[in-house]
Amino acid sequence: MTEHMGMNRTGLQMSPLDSQAMQQYAGPLPAPSTEADALALTRADYAAHAPALGSVPLPGSIKGAMLAAGAMLTGDRPEILLDKLAERLAFERGGTRLYDALLDKCQALDTTHTSITEAEIRRMRNDEAHHFLQIGQAIEELGGDPTCQTPSADLVGMETLGLVQVLSDPRTSISQALHAILTAELSDQAGWEALIALAEAQDQPELAQMGSIALAQERDHVQMISTWYRESLGLAGPGQVGAADRGTNIQSQGKEIQ
Ligand SMILES: [Fe+2]
């Protein structure tokens, strides 16, 4: 574990004299107006006049154009479904990379206080990769282009930047890495729930069914990562919490630890 007492000097308590001088210099807090108001006005002005984050392309194939036209005639908005499919595509690709990084970290650090297993990490990683392929196929079947970066795909790419940084930072602990993965998995679960609802609303039963199977797997991921996270904090011993009973600890599979 990397959480330990050390020479952290970031808090005011570390330097009472300097902190007192700083607070005297700062004086009483200004009335909540002027600068804060100016900033709010500037933000509002930018938000009112900024272009959108991007657009969903018109389907490039004849089949796609016909499907989109048909959907629009019935009042559906196929661009929302395509945008959210592209979002899932981007997220599942990112999730695959997060699990690759988690595997590397778990092979290097001590995980004996948890029930983490290499097999379980690989299983969840492969689930994400499989979802990625399924979504790409679904986009193509709807006449869309799975290589296109739509607004929501752009959005989740930006959102997950911090998670990737946490996983790839050599200083982060197993517990910290699991916290980042848990953040991703909770978002993943909500994303699938929204996609299934959209697929049902736009009369795409096969897509909704595929999404339901994926959602069940994502819920299992949330459970598994949550269990490992609690174990990493010492809140439970290895294997004491439900789903994590499966498999063998990663260290006992011959992965030597520091
Ligand atoms: Fe997942």
Image: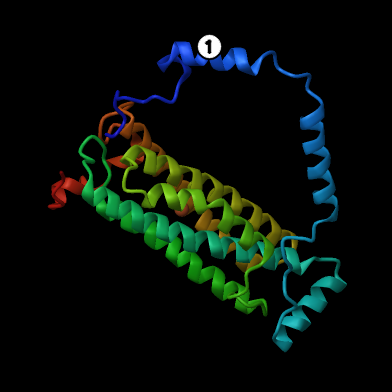
> Going by the picture, which residue comes out furthest to the bottom?
62
Q: Is residue 210 visible?
A: no
Q: Quadrant of the C terminus?
A: top left
- Quadrant for residue 60, please give it: bottom right
Q: Residue at the spot x=72%, y=61% of the render?
A: 53
Q: Residue at the spot x=77%, y=31% of the render?
A: 35
Q: Position of residue 249 (x, y in %)?
A: 21, 45
Describe residue 63's horizontal placement relative to residue 181 as left or right.
right
Describe residue 43's horizontal placement relative to residue 206 as left or right.
right
Q: Position of residue 164 (x, y in %)?
A: 44, 53
Q: Residue at the spot x=58%, y=75% of the render?
A: 147
Q: Which residue is mark 1?
A: 20
Label 1 secondary element: helix
- Quadrant for residue 71, please give it: bottom right
| Depth order, front residue of 32/195 | 32
Which amino acid type corresponds to the residue marked 1 in the rendered image?
Gln
- Quadrant for residue 82, please give it: bottom right
Q: Residue at the spot x=67%, y=80% of the render?
A: 143
| Depth order, front residue of 202/146 | 146
